[in-house]
Image: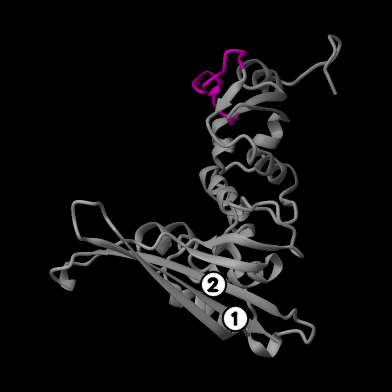
Amino acid sequence: MALSGNCRTNPKEQASVQNSFPDVVELNVGGQVYYTRHSTLVGTPNSLLGKLFSSKKDASNDLARDPKGRYFIDRDGFLFRYVLDYLRDKQVVLPDHFPEKGRLRKEAEYFQLPDLVKLLTPDDIKHSPDDYFHSDYEDGSQGSDHRQCPPPSLVPADRKSGFITVGYRGSCTMGRESQTDAKFRRVPRILICGRVALAKEVFGETLNESRDPDRTPDRYTSRFYLKFKHLERSFDMLSECGFQMVACNSSVTASFVNQHTEDKIWSSYTEYVFYRK
């Protein structure tokens, strides 16, 4: 309720109004404008926003502002809506098939909201929250498998059957003189083809959907790929979810590097077909 001229305020309230932030705060987060109550921002005192907007000291002059005078925060403006929802309700509701969960978890870490980080962390990797962000996809370490499948004793009788195809591509450059001079190139990615729902069940957050982000679970895709580079790791995940390899095929091609040398580029592509009854 707004105070009228006839209302009295105690000294603490008057000092807060005069020396600190307004009741309604206007934010510019990465170009997205938000309006929220000051009490929402400081409702979690140990969070970054709780510290920045604390009324215990006049910190309003220390925050960056955009040309229109709004408090500016240089973070992802789209994902901040979920951070703000959490500050309001202490819970967050994400859309179905939300592809930005990993990035939202990064935002939660930045804003120092450990309970939100826990909500966004899959149950099977909560013991090691850094595994996902430092996986072998980035630095060559083993990381976590992030397996989503339950143990066989807990598998429902109506679990969906289907096929998943794993594609693996590699190449090397080899001279005619000696095979010891072969220069192997890094395998760019492991491709996943099949029904979207099955692929997500098996690979979870290790599945990169950026090349085909709008596929519904009942549709099929041939454009997903994995965020790690070890083929055996994908086999383990498929096996733990009840899939068995039923077929595979491979092709090898060679082409000259250029017309001035006899060095050749050998390229191979292998597909492994897995099926679950």
Specify which label sits upstream in the sequence, 1 or 2.
Answer: 2
Instruction: Give the percent coordinates (x, y) of residue 142.
Output: 39, 69
Given the current orientation, which residue lies at the most extreme bottom position? 153
Q: Nearer the viewer, residue 230 or 108?
A: 230
Rendering coords of residue 66 (x, y %) = 57, 17
Where does residue 191 sit, x and y in percent of width and height? 53, 65
Q: Assign the magenta stretch its main secondary structure.
A: loop
Q: Is residue 249 magenta?
A: no
Three-letter amino acid code at disc 2?
Val
Horizontal side of 1 relative to 194 (left or right) equals right
Q: Identify the residue under disc 2.
A: 166
Q: Is residue 141 visible?
A: no
Q: What mark, if any, has residue 93 been given in the picture?
A: none
The front one of 229 and 120 is 229
Secondary structure at badge 2 equals strand
Q: Which residue ends up furthest to the top in the rendered image?
A: 5
Residue depicted at 46% across the width and 76% down the height:
250
Badge 1 density bin: few <14, some 14–19, many ≥20, Cα 10 Å: many
Q: Are marks 1 and 2 in contact (CB under 8 Å)?
A: yes
**Residue at mark 1 to residue at mark 2: CA–CA distance:** 8 Å
- Count how many numbered circles sit on residues in the image: 2
Q: Residue at x 57, y 67 (%)?
A: 192
Task: Tell me the residue that label 1 is attached to.
Answer: 274
Q: Is residue 176 visible?
A: yes
Residue numbers of the magenta segment: 53-69
- For the C terminus, give its image quadrant: bottom right
Image coordinates for residue 253, horizontal then vertical, percent: 38, 67
Disc 1 residue type (three-letter): Phe
